[in-house]
Image (spheres, rainbow, N blue to C red):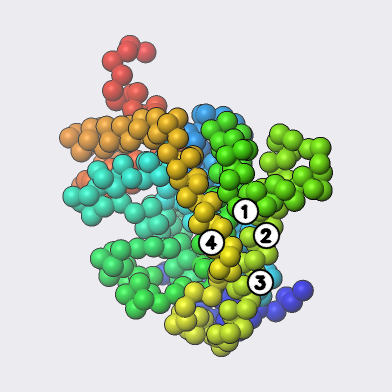
Amino acid sequence: MMSELAPYAAHTESSRGRRFREAPPRGRSEYQRDRDRIIHSTGFRRLEYKTQVFVNHEGDLFRTRLTHSLEVAQIGRSVARHLSLSEDLTEAITLAHDLGHTPFGHSGQDALNDCMKPYGGFEHNLQSLRVVDVLEQRYGAFDGLNLTFETREGILKHCSLKNARLLGDVGERFIRRQRPGLEAQIANLADEIAYNNHDVDDGLRSGLLEMEQLATVGIFRRHMRAALKAYPKIEGRRLVHETVRRMIDTLVTDLIRQSAASIRAHAPASVDDVRKAPPMIRFSQRIQQEQIELKQFLRSNLYRHYRVSRMSSKARRIITDLFQAFLAEPGLLPPEFQTRAETDTPRAIADYIAGMTDRYAIVEHRRLFSIDVS
Ligand code: MG
């Protein structure tokens, strides 16, 4: 395997640098330093108690955003290594990509966005950037983690044009309609591979999905058959794992093969060429179609399952209640957020709520609304 980075990879020496100048790191590269800062951050530890689909206390074996981020990092690094791209940068982006997520997964994010509509909205990608740029308070010289431009740009997967204009350097590509570097493109698809597959796994584990239902989905059926062909007697969890690991392998292999072909076809000489070209990290047509089918299946059978809807409804209520209570009485906010609230009250409330874990949000709601004597 090649260890040399490709000319179109992110090279530490040609990094666009950090917002605040710092002495170069010793014994590690700039992107490794980014990764280390992310792992040591408070936001990263909070990922352990935040969820995507299932609420954290539903069960101990479901994915949390922490294990999800580790799976994304592992997939992303494999792909980066095969394509001679920067594993370190890919790892930094993948580990940070969900830092801005609210408690209670997508329903929490939607609820907070609804609350923030009149005040500039709430976007979780933008919030991830806000965590590493502003909200983490660990260094004497600056707010945030002072990460490199490349990691910050990779974290900002989507962004509205309005916000892109306010962001300066990392917003540029949205205005120019350009792509980010290949490492960021990998992070994006590694995320997709990870969540589709672990949602299948968690969906089955929770009993919300059945094997028979999933067997109607092309990619699952194909790999389940392959697993049963190799081990005709297996069933239950063992069959699920043999199927899911085959799906992940197929997706990763396809992503590497197709991306290598499209990099060859576009022959970029530099990161600048990558930015101007169409996305080069991609699945083949066939796998892309199968992924869409699987996503649609998950949407109608798992994400809209009545038991998930009940959790989402409760989550929405908790977030909305908290937001409105703090907006009516900012004096209820903890002191550090009251200071922030002096300049922008709704944003300070959104920062506070977005930083909560599932459990913390439930407890905070109880503290503010329960009339029980405790
Ligand atoms: Mg993710």
* Front: mark 2 or 4: 4
* Residue 71 visible in rendering: no
Kind of residue indicated by mark 2: Thr
Which disc, if any, is residue 289? Answer: 4
Q: Quadrant of the C terminus?
A: top left
**Along the polypeptide, which appears first: circle 1 or circle 4?**
1
Kind of residue indicated by mark 3: Arg
Q: Are marks 2 and 4 in contact (CB under 8 Å)?
A: no
Q: Which residue is mark 3?
A: 257
Q: Is residue 360 above or below residue 216?
A: above
Q: Is residue 108 above or below residue 120?
A: above
Q: Residues within 10 Å of mark 4 (few under 14, many from 20)?
A: some
**Along the polypeptide, which appears first: circle 1 or circle 2?**
1
* CA distance for labels 1 and 2: 9 Å
Give the residue at x 69% y 51%. Answer: 223
Q: Are marks 1 and 2 in contact (CB under 8 Å)?
A: yes
* CA distance for labels 3 and 2: 10 Å
* CA distance for labels 1 and 3: 18 Å
Which disc, if any, is residue 219? Answer: 1
Give the residue at x 39% y 30%. Answer: 310
Q: Nearer the viewer, residue 178 or 364?
A: 178
Kind of residue indicated by mark 4: Gln
Q: Position of residue 295 (x, y in %)?
A: 50, 51
* Front: mark 1 or 2: 1
Q: Are marks 1 and 4 in contact (CB under 8 Å)?
A: no
Kind of residue indicated by mark 1: Ile
Q: Quadrant of the N terminus?
A: bottom right
Q: Which residue is mark 2?
A: 250
